[in-house]
Structures are given as C-alpha cells and as structure tokens.
Image: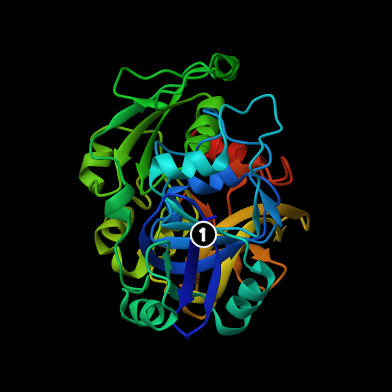
Amino acid sequence: MPRAALALEDGTVYVGESFGAAGTVSGEVCFNTSMTGYQEILTDPSYRGQILCMTAPQIGNYGVNAADVESDRLQMAGFVVREASRVASNFTATGGLGDYLARAGVVGLAGIDTRALVRRLRIRGAMTGVLSSEVLDPATLVGMAQSAPALVGRDLVREVMPQRPDEWLEPLAEEARPLRQPAAGGILPAAAARGPAKHVVALDYGMKWNIARHLASQGCRVTVLPGKATAAEVLALAPDGVFLSNGPGDPEVLGYCVETVRGLVGKVPIFGICLGHQLLALACGAKTFKLKFGHRGANQPVMDLSTGKVEITSQNHGFAVDEATLPAVLEVTHRNLNDGTIEGLRHTTAPAASVQYHPEAAAGPHDSAYLFDRFRAMLA
C-alpha cells in the first residue's frame, strides 16, 4: 500500500497507509467516538477545515450509499482510521469508503494507532495538523503543521453556506440528486395530518439535511436562506418561525450572523442547533469559548433540567457557551453530564430556545425528538 503520514503541531508524526485521495491537506485534528454513521459524518458541513480521527477500530464495513448523506459533498479535509474496510457488507451499499473518499478528493490515512492519537488529543487538546500522501519527511511535515492556519478566528461558514435561497423538497429515497431544490416548496405527505403548514425560514450556516427533514415532518414549509441573510430579508418572508442551523468554525468571528439573530429575537419564534445555539447566545450578550478537544460522537449524555430525564445525544462541536457570561434573559435548560457545559438555553422573555447537540441525528435513537415538537408548538 502507498504510505501517508499525519503530523501534529507539537511534533508528533504518525505514519500509515494512504487510502482515498492522494494529496496534502491541513486542518484541526479532532476525533469522533461514534461506532457508525461515518458517511453522515463525512458529509456534515460542521467538519469543514478539520482532519477527523474515528475511534472505532474498523470503518467502512457497510460501505456508502446515496441516502446516507447530510450535504451535497464531503466536507472535511482528511479522514483517519485504524482499519479501512475494503469490503462493503451491506445490501444498501453502492460503493466502498476508499473510492468514495478518492472521488471527493478527501485524503485518508489508515493503519496507525488511533488510540495513541486520541489520547494525545485528549491530553494536549485539539491541534493543527497536516495529512499527506506526498510528503513523508517528518521534519518537513511538522514544520508545515506549525505554519498552517488555526481553526480559531476563521470564518468557515462562508465556505459551506448556500449561495441563494431554496425551498426544501424531499426527493424519493433512491434518488441521488441534492435534496434542496430551487422550486415552490412542499412538505412530507405525513405532515399533512398536523394541519396547515407553518412557514419556517432556516438560516443555513452549513445545515445538515436531516434537520430540514425533521422540520418538514412537523408540518412546516421550509425556506432555506444563506446564513449571511439579514434580519430584514428574513422578516420580509413573513415566517411563522426561524431556525438557526449548525455550521463550522469559530462563532465569535460571525458578527454578521449574530447581528441578524439579534434583529430577530422577540419578533419571531427561534430555534437553534449547535452553531445556531452559540449564535443565539452571542446575540443575547453571552460569550463562547473553545473546548479542549470538543464533543464529537453519538454517546454524549445530556440532562433536560425541566424534566430530569437524560438523553443520549449526537454531538459535533468544538466551542461552547461560557456560563459565566450568560445575561439574565437566558436560562440554562440542558446540561452535559460529562463536563457540565451548557447544552441548551431558553430566552426568558421571548420565544427563543436552542440546544448545542443534534436532536435530528437519532443517537438515542429518539431521545431528543421532542425538541422539534416544542418548536412546532412555539409556532402555533
């Protein structure tokens, strides 16, 4: 097998086998503890600018297919696994992981001790790294990693947001075309039982497609606007509610997004997920901070403080809201049981709420689905 290597900015180098595309990429090196769902992870826009290591020992064993995608392309810079399966053993598979990465131009690394890499990231924190199948000299790679741009301070949302408004339409499951279509909107047939459709404007900072599916299943007609849209542009569509999506990078540099959210609070019901949660907090006067190594996986325990129930959640974020900076108008509704960080917020005087995790990702599998019901009730 051809060789590839990953170098971290602290001087550590891991050498293994190259799979996927050939090339050299840089990014923040992080890890995900999910056992399955690698195709959804690869296509999640929130991973823009990152090199991801999976902690599960074998990845790719059920192949890839056209249905298990969360955007119209693979998003991350590089992908690192212990063992890349070369055989797809699932009847839904239409191809293998290696070819999938190669077609998308994503550089892969297999055959390294991923336990050692993850342990280093947990101890030292997420670091900038360089992954290459072209340059294997350790000193050169380390120098490249040390000079590569860091994730903090970069606006990655502009790289993944759509360029024009769309109406969400759900295609047939077997069709591989993009799931957002520039056409007059529609909702899932099952949603008709909920009564007249509510109009939700989704501000797309890198939105996962399954979120739009859940909004549609609630009986909502979903208009997707680029995340750079202004409050005036949103309100001109007369929505019944506004959704703030997930997305990549540092929330503190997204002043234009924060300004839009600030102009919407109190004027229309709001629900935010992940980056949308952070933007709502920033718009209300709170601050965010970078977590040491982030929360990425499908097994994060979160408590709903209003009920005392614990949800098993799917998460992907490297920043969190700083509780010490919360204004009086925001109250904590959910808390991470691993490290105590804020996982949910509610505005005390306006119809606005948010969660840091992904209720659409079905980690529990349906522990968090009630959050979409709560948002639908806000629109009544």
Residue type pointed to by label 1:
Thr
The picture places residue 249, in percent across and down from the top left corner, at 39, 63
Q: Is residue 200 above or below residue 248?
A: above
> Front-most of 201 and 1?
1
Q: Nearer the viewer, residue 337 or 56?
A: 56
Whether residue 50 is visible, yes or no, is yes
User: In this rendering, would 163 be left or right of 222?
Assistant: left
How many labels were placed on the picture? 1
> Where's the N terminus, which quadrant?
bottom right
* Direction from residue 40 to residue 106 in the image, left or right: left
Residue nearer the viewer, 334 or 113: 113
Percent position (x, y) of residue 70? Answer: 49, 39
**Observer-nearest residue: 262 or 122?**
122
Using the image, determine if residue 303 lies above or below residue 226: below
SS of the residue under disc 1 = loop
List the residue tagged with mark 1. 348
Give the residue at x 54% y 19%.
173
